Amino acid sequence: MTEKINVETELTEGAKESLRLIQIEIEKIVSSDIKEFTYQAFAEVDEQFWTSASSSTGKYHPPEDNGEGGLVRHVVKGLAVIDQFGRRAKFTPRELDMARSAFLLHDTKKGGVVWGKYTDYTHGLIASEWLKKFKLADEMAKEQILNAVRFHMAPWCYAVNPFEDRLFTKEEMNQNINELTRAMYPTRIEQAVQEADYWSSRESMSFFPGVAVDFRHDGPDDSKR
């Protein structure tokens, strides 16, 4: 397979494998414009995306989602759920492409605006804002993809990080209420991404498509996720 995601830094072997897995999934997108939009974003994703675990402490997610490349394995697992959700909901090929693109991109800012040690609980909102700069002529499709990324954590969506040790302003609290309210009434694409993220991350649902799973949890070092 020709490498279509160009990164500026030299990648580890583990990161190269993560890139390979993501490229395989992008190539399943039929719509050329949505595929190109997705490639644009992955060309600029933080290099730590390729190596990070899905749970920053190893306390959450099934064991195969943790360790080096665990975040990418979570994405691959969720895409398998997307395909089954779309089949059952009778998605059109275009709807399935939007849902696949959104799930591929939903955790691209999981570490925050600047990738940090722990999960940023506003990463859906951060990613949807970041994705605005990439070109997709079909504005309706772009809006659906960005909104599915933004609200993928429903019902745990935030406009401010709930783990910051400070008092929030009335404006910030209202923003949080608006974010949660909107997230609770999903479109078909948003619901597909929410369900895929939820079910593929349950600790008791350990699987990796086509691979016998024998991964172990990392040791948690504190109470944060």
Image: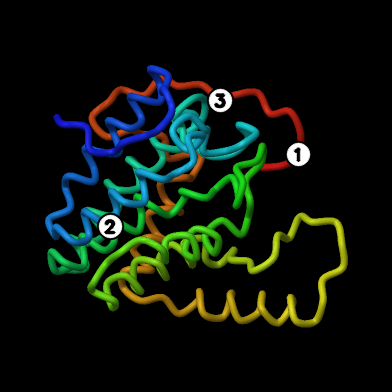
Q: Amino acid at mark 2?
A: Phe
Q: Residue at x 32, y 69 (%)?
A: 189
Mark nearest the camera among 3 and 2 is 2
Amino acid type at image mark 3: His
Q: Quadrant of residue 37?
A: bottom left
How crowded is the residue under tag 3: few (<14 C-alpha within 10 Å), some, or many (20+)? some
Query: Rounded to the nearest whole Å, what is the CA distance between mark 1 and mark 3?
Result: 15 Å
Q: Residue 174: percent from the left, percent from the top?
A: 70, 82
- Quarter of the rendering occupied by the N terminus: top left
Residue designated by label 2: 37
- Helix, strand or loop under label 2: helix
State how far apart marks 2 and 1 are (Cα): 37 Å
Callout 1 amino acid: Ser
**In contact (CB < 8 Å): disc 2 and disc 1:** no
Q: Secondary structure at mark 1?
A: loop
Q: Position of residue 146 (x, y in %)?
A: 40, 67
Query: Label 1: which residue?
Result: 223
Q: Which residue is mark 3?
A: 217
